[in-house]
Image: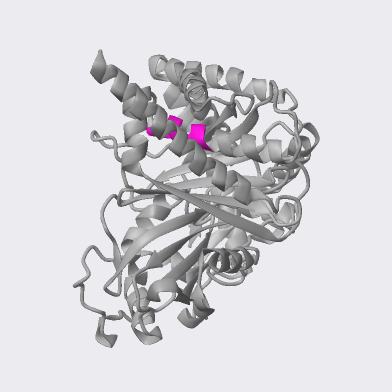
Amino acid sequence: MDRMSPLDASFLHIEDSDRTVGMHIGSTAVFEGPAPDPATFSRTVEARLPLVPRYRQRVEAVPLGLGRPVWVDDADFALDYHVRRTALPAPGGEAELQRLVARLMSQRLDRTKPLWEMWVVEGLADGQWALMSKVHHCMVDGISGVELLAVLMDLSPDAPDPAASDVVPWEPERAPSRADLTLQTVGELATSQYEQLRVVGAMMRQPRRLLEPAGELVAGLRSLAGLARPATSTLSGSIGPHRQVAWAETDLHTIKTIRAALGGTVNDVVLTAITRGFRDLLVGRGEDVAGKVVRTLVPVSVRATRSDGAAAHDGTFDNKVSAMFAELPVSLDDPVEVLAAIRQQLGDLKESKQAVAGEALTSLSGFAPPVLLGLGMRLAARVVTRTGNVHTVTTNVPGPQLPLYSCGRLMLKAYPYVPIAAPMRIGVSIFSYNGSVTFGVTGDRDVSPDISTLAVGITTAIDDLASAAAAAADAAAKT
């Protein structure tokens, strides 16, 4: 039995406060065909489950809300409930696949079972098939989600299919009774206060170690305070339970070429393309974009990093994310000017320590009883709805830069999915894999049926930036 972290629990509270929201993340991976037969694919998944024990655990609430929910083994776990199969009328194109994904992603996960599903989708054009996966955000954030994807995939097409003898028998641990949960939670509450005081005392005995992060926190909070300024738009407001998805794609080589010629980082180039998409979307809706910005929440991984810059793995797949807030200058038409503006802004945000402040505020929620945390999430939702101070979420997850296989079939590309919650009616997620970069746009079906305009704008911006980069390279060569 494991206690859920405050951040992980908050994703459940968001769902509890708004029945139109499903807080699951996901992806749609397209593979070379033909699709594996059901028995082979199920054995492949079942053989890997010991590597991700959370996939056979369910959420158990603590009586009276005395503590955060816990993870317990699901004694009734049935793999065929979670691994499902469907098909498109052949040959299914991208539009048909997007409609199917939108419908499946609109359905919330069953809280009484482990919070994940996989759908094998047959009938795609060119004999291809797709694997649509959805996992609740309380189980895994974007960075560790990539690690889970790697666990469930192979690095070679020649990896042998698991036999029935390869599946390790699983015996679930006995689920705690309500009395057990109550007693353990009360005991943790009693001991945690002592532990918190002990940690504070240890920090006070080392003032130098205390002052540096405290200074970063103050700087971050000062930057976050600017979000109080209202920013109204058709991008903000209430949403319904149904979703719409749209996709765009490019390649990492093109983005790196743009970065080398025009400056900035890969993330700067990506946000520049998304800015153009939002500009085209708002102009298409008849909005005046003069002097306007689109405020976006940018999740940031706060996992420890190794010396080579890669995320360090501590053996868990829990959420370890914070956030920065950026303003996309949709008033600018020239993509080179947009890139320069975003490059400057993100540099300032890194200096402002916004991500540090976000992580600290998330950690502080561990001091509050879960009931108050839930009420706080609801209050925050109301405040954001009234002020409209954040328009969208933009998450960029670097994936494995080598080919992956499932049952001997090459994964060609993967389109990410990010959930949305009012007042944010649109979200954008970016995923890089084996040299490709894909954009997944999520929108509310009723109020944002035009998100394909945003996806097309992303592609247009990449083409324009690539042309500007080529011109800059030619000019540099001549001089």
Q: How many marks?
A: 0
How far across and down, in percent of the image, does residue 240 sit? 76, 56
> Is residue 313 on the magenta stretch?
no
Any part of residue 398 in sight: yes
Image position, residue 116 (x, y; %): 51, 67
Q: Does the stretch in magenta take in 272?
A: yes
- The residue positioned 78% from the left and 47% from the top of the image is 238
Question: Is 357 displayed left or right of 210 in the figure?
Answer: right
Q: Residue furthest right?
A: 386
* Depth order, front residue of 188/6: 6
Pinpoint residue 459: horizontal percent, then vertical percent: 49, 43
Nearest the viewer among 471 and 49 is: 471
Q: Position of residue 194 (x, y in %)?
A: 52, 37
92, above or below 201, in the image? below
Q: Is the C terminus in the top left, top right, bottom left or bottom right quadrant?
A: top left
For residue 283, which quarter of the picture?
top right
Q: Residue furthest front?
A: 478
Residue shown at 42%/26% (left/top)? Answer: 202
Looking at the rendering, the stretch of residues picked out in magenta corresponds to 266-273
- Report the side of 120 relative to 187 (left or right): left
Residue 300 in sight here: no
Q: In terms of secondary structure, what is the magenta stretch mainly?
A: helix
Above or below residue 444? Residue 206 is above
Closer-to-camera residue (233/229) = 233
- Direction from residue 431 to residue 384 in the image, left or right: right
Colour scheme of the rendered structure: one colour
